[in-house]
Image (spheres, rainbow, N blue to C red):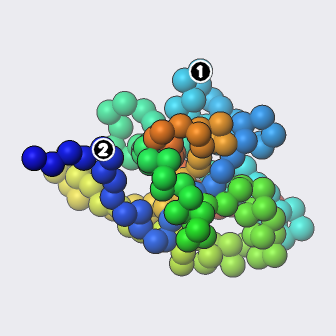
């Protein structure tokens, strides 16, 4: 007889978990139940902005997901360099121009997601970027919210 207290899978190596403080970071929550929220960062001098958003609509094909990681995995993610506070991470990105920001996220955190919609195969680019709220770090299972990344120019050239 086997007894399993906690089982979890290995996190993929090209994932980024950003820790956000709801009180001090610029996170915008669009619903009362915190299912839809956004984070925006811009670099006006280099003319680019990125938006991270988590949207979950029941029954939709392209939803972002919420994963529950055992608390023990958080220190492992930090040890491997996959866990960072969001502000220092965004400050590091300020050294890049618009093209370099796009290449950085594509090279390190992107993958192509395939799914069926009305018997037709669809593909779109997704990112292994997750938000963890600082207030959730002490929970037994820490919620990690998959984010959609949108890159943009601030002004037209």
Image coordinates for residue 46, horizontal then vertical, percent:
84, 70
The answer, for residue 148, to whether it is visible in the render is: no
Tag of residue 5: 2
The answer, for residue 113, to whether it is visible in the render is: yes
The alpha-carbon separation of the residues under discs 1 and 2 comes to 33 Å
User: In the current view of this chain or complex, which residue is farthest to the front?
Assistant: 1
Q: Residues within 10 Å of mark 2 (few under 14, many from 20)?
A: few
Corner quadrant of residue 113: bottom left
Image coordinates for residue 69, horizontal then vertical, percent:
44, 48
Tag of residue 32: 1
Residue at 54 percent of width and 23 percent of height: 33
Image coordinates for residue 157, horizontal then vertical, percent:
80, 70
Q: Residues within 10 Å of mark 1 (few under 14, many from 20)?
A: few
Q: Is residue 18 left or right of residue 24?
A: left
Marks 1 and 2 close (CB-CB < 8 Å)? no
Residue at 53 percent of width and 37 percent of height: 139
Please state which of residues 65 and 51 is positioned toward the viewer in this rendering.
65
Q: Is residue 130 above or below residue 22?
A: below
For the image, the number of numbered tags is 2
Corner quadrant of residue 106: bottom right
Tag of residue 121: none
Query: Marks 1 and 2: which is nearer the front?
Result: 2
Q: Is residue 123 left or right of residue 30?
A: left
Corner quadrant of residue 42: bottom right
Please state which of residues 109 and 120 is positioned toward the viewer in this rendering.
109
Mark closest to the chain's N terminus, 1 or 2? 2
Residue at 65 percent of width and 36 percent of height: 135
Q: In this view, does 72 lie above or below 125?
A: above
User: In the current view of this chain or complex, which residue is farthest to the right?
Assistant: 45
Image coordinates for residue 3, horizontal then vertical, percent:
20, 45
Q: What element carries label 1?
A: loop
Q: What element carries label 2?
A: loop
């Amino acid at each position: 007889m086997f007894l399993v207290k906690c089982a979890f899978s290995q996190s993929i190596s090209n994932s980024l978990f950003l820790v956000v403080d709801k009180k001090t970071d610029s996170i915008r929550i669009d619903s009362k139940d915190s299912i839809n929220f956004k984070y925006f960062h811009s670099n006006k001098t280099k003319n680019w902005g990125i938006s991270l958003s988590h949207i979950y609509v029941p029954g939709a094909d392209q939803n972002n997901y919420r994963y529950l990681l055992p608390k023990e995995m958080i220190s492992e993610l930090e040890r491997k360099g996959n866990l960072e506070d969001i502000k220092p991470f965004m400050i590091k990105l300020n050294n890049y121009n618009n093209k370099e920001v796009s290449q950085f996220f594509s090279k390190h955190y992107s993958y192509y997601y395939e799914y069926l919609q009305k018997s037709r195969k669809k593909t779109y680019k997704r990112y292994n970027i997750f938000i963890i709220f600082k207030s959730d770090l002490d929970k037994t299972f820490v919620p990690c919210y998959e984010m959609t990344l949108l890159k943009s120019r601030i002004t037209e050239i």
